[in-house]
Image: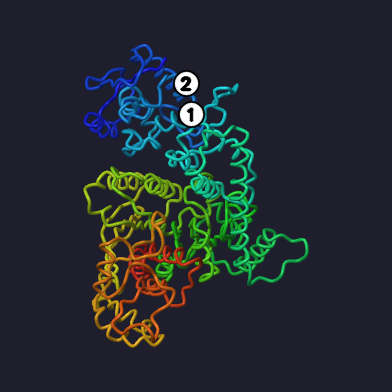
Amino acid sequence: MSLLFPRLLAAQAAPLFHEYRDLSVDELSARSTTTHEAAVYVATGGDRVNTAQLRNLRDSVVDLARRSGFPHAATRGGNTEFDLQLAALLHAETGMVPAEAASRDVWAFLALVLLPDVAYWRYPHPPRDRVLGTDLTRHVFGRLWWRAHLVRDPEAVAPYAALDILGEAAFDQIYARRAALGGSSHMVRAILRVWDRLDLRGVGERDALRDFLKRLLRLAPFVLFDGVEEHALDAELRAVADETVEVLLKAQAKSAETTTSQTPPLPSGTSAADALVSVSRDVRRELRAAMPESRSNGPAAAGSLLPDQPFNVHVADGSSLSGRFAPRLRPGLRSPRFIELYAGCGAQALGLERAGFVPALLVDNKPDACLTISANRPDWPVLCTDVLSLGHDPQQYAHLVDVDLLSAGMPRLKAASAAGDGEERRLLHHTLDLVEQLQPRAIMLENLPDLVESDAFRDDRTDIAERLARAGYSCRWTVVNAADFGVAQNRRSSVIVALREPHGAFAWPEPELAGPPTVGQVLGPSMASRGWIGAAQWAAQADRVGPALVGGSDRRGGADLGPTGSKKAWAALRVDGGSLWDDVPDSDFPADGTPHLTVDQAAAIQALPVNWMLSGGKTSRYRQVGHATPPPVATALGGAIRAALGR
């Protein structure tokens, strides 16, 4: 028998959500009830749940929460175990059918009426989607019901045993593709069976899962997965998974080969991992002799370096090099250190380097971007992995705690009401989690201008400001234009700068008085480099800055200059934005022709150095350029932050 639950509609749920954020868990326990005057029922088939059943459900959930520290304590490990057990409990005891569980209003009732104390204990000061159900993959209770529903094997002795095969972030990759893959229990269970037996040594699980699912999505239009018998489906999925692992291992071997190409040959029988650790130990011995006195007198200052940390590592998660970073010198009077998340091709990091910062770690999940950074700055420590894989083992990153700056050019957010933005918002929340763990002295987050200017992002601004304030940071917001800092591009972006208390006075950098160069001034020499007779006339007509380079999204097709509006703006500068060329015009190109840009010319518009090498194919290289923060912008912001830090 299926059960129908009360629904709390958005108009009634939103005020409660905001009110409850200011209440303690004990106060919320007092507000718990089985009814709400505005609650409604919708007939999806079944009987209405009665008061006794709701009370029994509450008692079961509260008893389970108490085992994990409710109401006044919680731990990361305890939360994980609580979630796994609660997923099974909710699915087994609520008696919902999928049509009922797909309603955000049902979950809003459970989180705000029946179990508000448990909801706000599990996620203190939660964002809207954790409670209101605007994204069921993130709802405190709804996400768990659906996870259990998809993995449940009704014929197994322990029907929910597969819940712990993948962590929540990894499982979300499957559920996010539910239209093609994740909506089928048959398919999800097959994925989990294959994944549980897969040898992932040497590759990162999240990166492997992403590649694996992309390969399955290519098959989805041609294969009716639900119609394939279990053993045959397992065999097909295993073949695809093995292909994924093979491809990633080859890519990592190529990365390692690039990194170590300047090192001496390895002795016979020595692995690359052993050699890297050996090199790092040699470097540590040299650095130890030159180590300045520490300003810390605590026990952690006794050694010059944290033990067994390789000097430079490019891949992580599961390999023998997993989680090893550049050695940390004991703090002293030296250049400030920074961590860069979503580092891309290293453009923002380059700007921070020019401002006097030294990278402690750069993180990106694109192999081509990581290779670009390593090719241009071989001594920079780069970790090629998903940001969501960081922070689960605090000891692994202990040497990065109290770094001077954490910077991040965040993936672009859409308004909370827009579809398809779950991954970007999860990355934002996880970045703030890392800030709370690592406690950098300063933070710099960059995103689209609407994050600061639009009312659609008011809740995001509130969440960010509140989380940073609780972590001890004073937060500032503004929108900067790259053209104000000498870049030939009208590229506006929001910037959040937060400094940990106590801090110096921070002031936003002033625009350059000289103004930016025009597109013609920047690209004129390259347009003339192969003898195009119309280059001078073209440069004279391209007499202003260009629009923001777009088209660098993974969700778009090939390399071009973006949507219709952007292409029209480029056309006004006599640039055809329909595609990118492999080379600049030559002597045969008509004098009055309209040239296309090359990737190198796009990089010049972004103010990347001429000698900054980009790795990968044309589309990959252009996406690296399109995602970049122009180095002069990062230099100006970095200088202002450094001044406030007194470094």
471 in relation to 260, above or below: above
* Quadrant where the C terminus is found in the figure: bottom left
Identify which residue, 388 or 619, lies in the foreground. 619
117 in relation to 130, above or below: above
Q: Secondary structure at mark 2?
A: helix
Q: Is residue 77 visible?
A: yes
Q: Is 377 positioned to the left or the right of 111 in the image? A: right
The disc placed on residue 92 is: 2
Return the x and y of residue 473 as percentages of the image width and height.
Answer: 34, 51
Which kind of residue does numbered mark 2 sit on? Ala
Identify which residue, 500 or 295, lies in the foreground. 500
Return the x and y of residue 302 as percentages of the image width and height.
Answer: 59, 56
Identify the residue at the far front of this view.
222
Identify the residue at the far right of this view.
268
374 in relation to 68, above or below: below
Which kind of residue does numbered mark 1 sit on? Ala
Q: Is 229 positioned to the left or the right of 352 in the image? A: right
The disc placed on residue 8 is: none
- Report the number of numbered marks: 2
Q: Is 173 positioned to the left or the right of 301 in the image? A: left
Callout 2 crowding tier (Cα within 10 Å): few <14, some 14–19, many ≥20: some
Q: Residue at x 41, y 59 (%)?
A: 405
Task: Compute the Cα span from label 2 to label 1.
Answer: 9 Å
Return the x and y of residue 543 as percentages of the image width and height.
Answer: 24, 79
Residue, disc 1: 148
* Quadrant where the N terminus is found in the figure: top left
Q: Residue at x 48, y 57 (%)?
A: 364
Q: Secondary structure at mark 1?
A: helix
Colour convention of the picture = rainbow
Looking at the image, do the residues carrying marks 2 and 1 touch, with CB atoms under 8 Å apart? yes
Q: Is residue 27 visible?
A: no
